[in-house]
Structures are given as C-alpha cells and as structure tokens.
Amino acid sequence: MTVAEFELLDGHTEESRVASWRFGALRRAGYDESAARELATRTDIDLHAAVDLVQAGCPIPTALRILL
C-alpha cells in the first residue's frame, strides 16, 4: 500500500484500523510521519522489530535501511 492509499483509508475496515494503529505506534517510537506511514502499510515488516530497533538506540535512518 502506498502512502497515498494510506491517506485515503476510511478507518472503517480492519486493514485501515490496523494501519492506523501501526502508524501511531511507530510515531510514538520516534519515526517521522513519512517513515511511519511507509512502515505502517508494509505488513511484511514486523512492527515490534521496527520499534525495538529505535528503542535500542538505532538511529532512524539506519533502522529504515535494515527494515526496508
């Protein structure tokens, strides 16, 4: 799912609720809005791994290179 598709989610489907929840968790972990959107919509990327990397002190750019 692209960032544009993410922005169009209506919030009423299971997929949109999960993406929104993931987005919030990623933003709270420290990812900027663009990175959080990208990661939130990529269900092939483990949310906990993304959050754990940052909480362990990994810089965001490095975390993104690892995850993407």
Image (cartoon, helix red, strand yellow):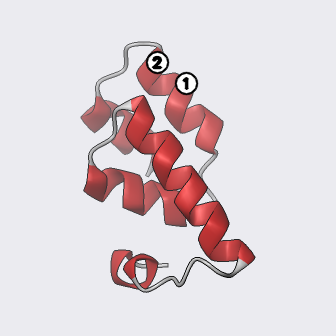
Distance of label 2 from label 1 (alpha carbons): 5 Å
Relative to 5, residue 28 above or below? above
Q: Which of 3 and 28 is in front in this view?
A: 28
Q: In which quarter of the image is residue 19?
A: bottom right
Tell me: 59 left or right of 8.
Answer: left
On the rendered structure, is 51 left or right of 35?
A: right
State whether residue 42 is above or below residue 46: below
Task: Tell me whether circle 2 and circle 1 mark residues in contact (CB < 8 Å).
Answer: yes
**In front: 63, or 31?**
31
Task: Residue at 66%, 62% (x, y): give it.
Answer: 18
The location of residue 47, given as percent across then percent down, is 60, 43
Task: Give the farthest residue toward the top.
Answer: 56
- Return the x and y of residue 50 as percentages of the image width and height: 52, 37
- Residue type beneath disc 2: Gln
Check residue 55 in the rendering and tell me which mark sits there, or answer none.
Answer: 2
Q: Does residue 7 appear to the left or right of 42 in the view shown? A: left
Q: Position of residue 65 (x, y in %)?
A: 35, 42
Closer-to-camera residue (13/67): 13
Q: Can residue 42 be seen in this view?
A: no
| Quarter holding residue 5 | bottom left
- Residue beneath label 1, please? 52
Dot 1 falls on a residue whose secondary structure is: helix
Tell me which amino acid carries mark 1: Asp
Rendered residue at 59%/52% (across/down): 45
Residue located farthest toward the right when viewing the structure as drawn: 14
Give the numbered dot on residue 22.
none
Residue at figure coordinates x 39%, y 52% from the top left: 36
Q: Residues within 10 Å of mark 1 (few under 14, many from 20)?
A: some
Crowd tier of the residue under label 2, counting other residues whose Cα lies within 10 Å: few below 14, some 14–19, many 20 or above:
few
